[in-house]
Amino acid sequence: MITVVLISHTPDPERTIAAAARVSASPVGAVELLDKLTPDRVDKLIERLISSGHMSVFEHASFTFAIEGISRVTSHQLVRHRLASYTQQSQRYVSLRDFKYITPASVNARSELAGRYHEMVRAAHRLYLEMLDAGIPAEDARYVLPNAAETRLVMTMNARELIHACSLRLCLRAQWEIVELFEHIKAEVEKVAPRLAAELKPKCYRLGYCDETESCGVFPTRAELGERPGGST
Amino acid sequence: MITVVLISHTPDPERTIAAAARVSASPVGAVELLDKLTPDRVDKLIERLISSGHMSVFEHASFTFAIEGISRVTSHQLVRHRLASYTQQSQRYVSLRDFKYITPASVNARSELAGRYHEMVRAAHRLYLEMLDAGIPAEDARYVLPNAAETRLVMTMNARELIHACSLRLCLRAQWEIVELFEHIKAEVEKVAPRLAAELKPKCYRLGYCDETESCGVFPTRAELGERPGGST
Amino acid sequence: MITVVLISHTPDPERTIAAAARVSASPVGAVELLDKLTPDRVDKLIERLISSGHMSVFEHASFTFAIEGISRVTSHQLVRHRLASYTQQSQRYVSLRDFKYITPASVNARSELAGRYHEMVRAAHRLYLEMLDAGIPAEDARYVLPNAAETRLVMTMNARELIHACSLRLCLRAQWEIVELFEHIKAEVEKVAPRLAAELKPKCYRLGYCDETESCGVFPTRAELGERPGGST
Amino acid sequence: MITVVLISHTPDPERTIAAAARVSASPVGAVELLDKLTPDRVDKLIERLISSGHMSVFEHASFTFAIEGISRVTSHQLVRHRLASYTQQSQRYVSLRDFKYITPASVNARSELAGRYHEMVRAAHRLYLEMLDAGIPAEDARYVLPNAAETRLVMTMNARELIHACSLRLCLRAQWEIVELFEHIKAEVEKVAPRLAAELKPKCYRLGYCDETESCGVFPTRAELGERPGGST
């Protein structure tokens, strides 16, 4: 089961972003700007920054999450977002005696297959333990562990990259486990920065159409729209 | 005059770094680790991370500074550190009617030259104002402004990049103005993270020698040491 | 006068990108894929990658440019693109005895102002030379030099970042000098990768509308369109 | 079995790096510098850049590798190097009917364990195929596949990051499979850039000591040296 806890973040993240943005076009400095910004002004500034694509100021607020209960399938996808910082539990240095793993819903829905899945995964873990006991290093024994094996990590991501990652990973064409992970991440951000969290949404909500080959149904594809916006140069 | 104000930062930055580091080799999660870490344990962990070169965990703490009173010479050098976020006051959108500029000490020490320097810089600014009044856009009028012109910006940098940038910019072979800027940055970090601030130091303190062509005298160069450590493969 | 020379680049950049893209969804490897790709297939793949927003594969081709004759105004803007590599001529180590500078067309169009601009810039340079001769270090004497001073640099940028940078810098709301720089860059890419160069265009051509406050006229703003696509969540 | 093929690279990488480096401190431009550089001068410049830590110019040369026959253990480690570009074969879109996997030497050395390892891995793959045939999507069926499963990818890395990654991954404390991968990478670079390849070496060769907790024996640790260089501030 995925758990995500926001363990640290830039205090007052939306006001920090708004104050930084004002510095660009203002004759006064950031300290003064920070003092003067009302919550309402902050909201309006964030709305304007988003709609004009001025995303770099969103880098001034960052968020650190403790993430647990995701599979190695998902951690491998997650760390492909390079503009973020990760510290992951090592399968080299930590022996996974207390083994947990993820089962896809599509497998669980098929009781006969599910039974064999659970059996196989547990058998792999038993062999892992035997190899450890026989003196095989954990870093080698883990080759037999399945992709399903749970991992945990700490991730720090700034608001700009959160907006970008959510645009890809909240898309229903992404894999269900990473969608679920980013829903948890969004829920955590919502507690401390609701205006910002409103911008954590799939790319189609921003584009007005689906750019995948096949749409999930929320927005039509460009082919279905009959034209590509701005397609001709 | 340079002023640097730390306007925001990851709360409890050293403990956040230490907890993230523990996740890598621990069977328990970050939330539990955060709770258990005593200040003394945090210090020891940071010492060990530095000495073994495990720098990536230092990315989990970031710092946002309001920087004012630096020249465009120095802002141009500063933004070359790409692993950080900057929002700078625009000379395109802000008309610099209230003009401030930097004068190098080497110029100020020579009264005749200094007089002509001040005169020249002010004459350039007067022409800038006249061009504005004649309808030249600020973005074009600024071509006449000197490198000495003051600028301000907001910078967010994580602790790993702060350590790296200070290793280069606190070196006395760097230009005096950026050395002074990073001394201010270090002083600000010191107020909230003294253990971390102790790692903000020139590269020679870490290397044990000077890798510049000529040493400032604090450490000998490798040529002076008579050998290059590990030089032969 | 701006000159841009493509001094090096990934050979056969479009085919390299296409082959890398195919690896993702193919059971065969990159070497075999490279061999099989016809020019026509490469073009179709690039079209599909762009329209579906699969931009990461464009990072496999990179381009190295020698850039000369731009002002420090523009080099300061340019190096803000952090996902690229720059080596710039140093005003610390190179004494600018042979001085060149940029004059904005808006200034040149006003003969009286232009005369005073040229005079001021040259006077600043004369004082610079006198300071050098009086023993002031070049790194300090340069504080008197104007933003207009020419600089040169080597820049390496991959195709993904070229597409992104051009989307911002070929926009007519960007400053004329950096627009001109990226037109030169695009012309150089065109010689070796015409299909890719066709993707180097302002963001409005991709969005189908202008996201600036005021449009240059090529595309209407969203306000003018009467609606924001996908605006409501 | 790991295979690494250098499918593309900046032509004449060492001369490109050297010419870019010269731009920084030279009054002439990159095109002229490129013409004048003799092979001997290139070698001397690279030597000097390395010894003085001026690493940024090494970013101007990049290398694209087709990598096959590594486990998902190793690809997960590899993509943690964020300053590089990766396109990996997808386990979501490619059904792994032709299954290959890696077996650690430590397991192969123990015939009884090895037999059970091979059996387990193959049984996992058989269940994977049955799940596919029963209509489970490949992206879900893969949860049962082991870490040992082979993957392939295309990686582009510039020379600066190659030097950094090799300093960590050619260290004998890194896991054997990624050490082997980087030995292949180094061998490929050697064919086209031997001077550069000489800089692809474990960090201890550069430091003159081992900064791991326990040394492999090539260099003593700092504790064994009896002192930490530059340790006191």
Image: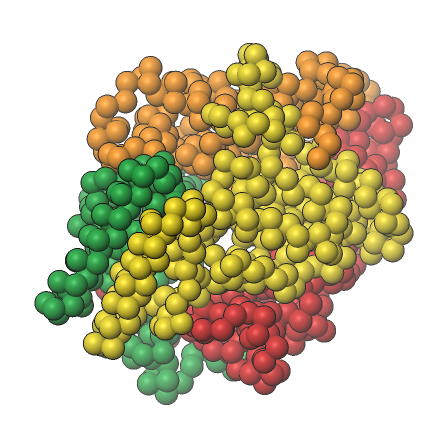
Chain colours: A yellow, B red, C orange, D green
Observer-nearest of A214 and B30 = A214
Looking at the image, residue D99 sits to the left or right of residue C131; the answer is left
Residue visible at 65% across and 31% down in the picture:
A206
Residue visible at 65% across and 76% down in the picture:
B194
Residue farthest along the left direction in this orientation: D111
Residue farthest along the bottom direction in this orientation: D226
> As displayed, is residue A15 above or below residue B35?
above
Observer-nearest of A79 and B106 = A79
Q: Is residue D107 visible?
A: yes
Instruction: Tell me the quarter of the picture where residue D140 sits.
Output: top left
The C terminus of chain D sits in image quarter: bottom right
Instruction: Tell me the quarter of the picture where residue C212 sits.
Output: top right
Observer-nearest of A192 and B222 = A192
Residue visible at 59% across and 85% down in the picture:
B40
Looking at the image, residue A215 sits to the left or right of residue A36; the answer is left
Residue visible at 55% across and 69% down in the picture:
B30
Residue C50 in percent (x, y) is at 48, 25
Residue farthest along the front direction in this orientation: A112
Residue C71 in percent (x, y) is at 63, 33
Residue D57 in percent (x, y) is at 43, 47
Q: Can residue D57 be seen in this view?
A: no
Q: For the image shown, how many numbered marks are present on the structure?
A: 0
Instruction: Tell me the quarter of the picture where residue D193 sits.
Output: top left
> As displayed, is residue C110 above or below residue B228?
above
Observer-nearest of D136 and C42 = D136
Residue C111 in percent (x, y) is at 79, 17
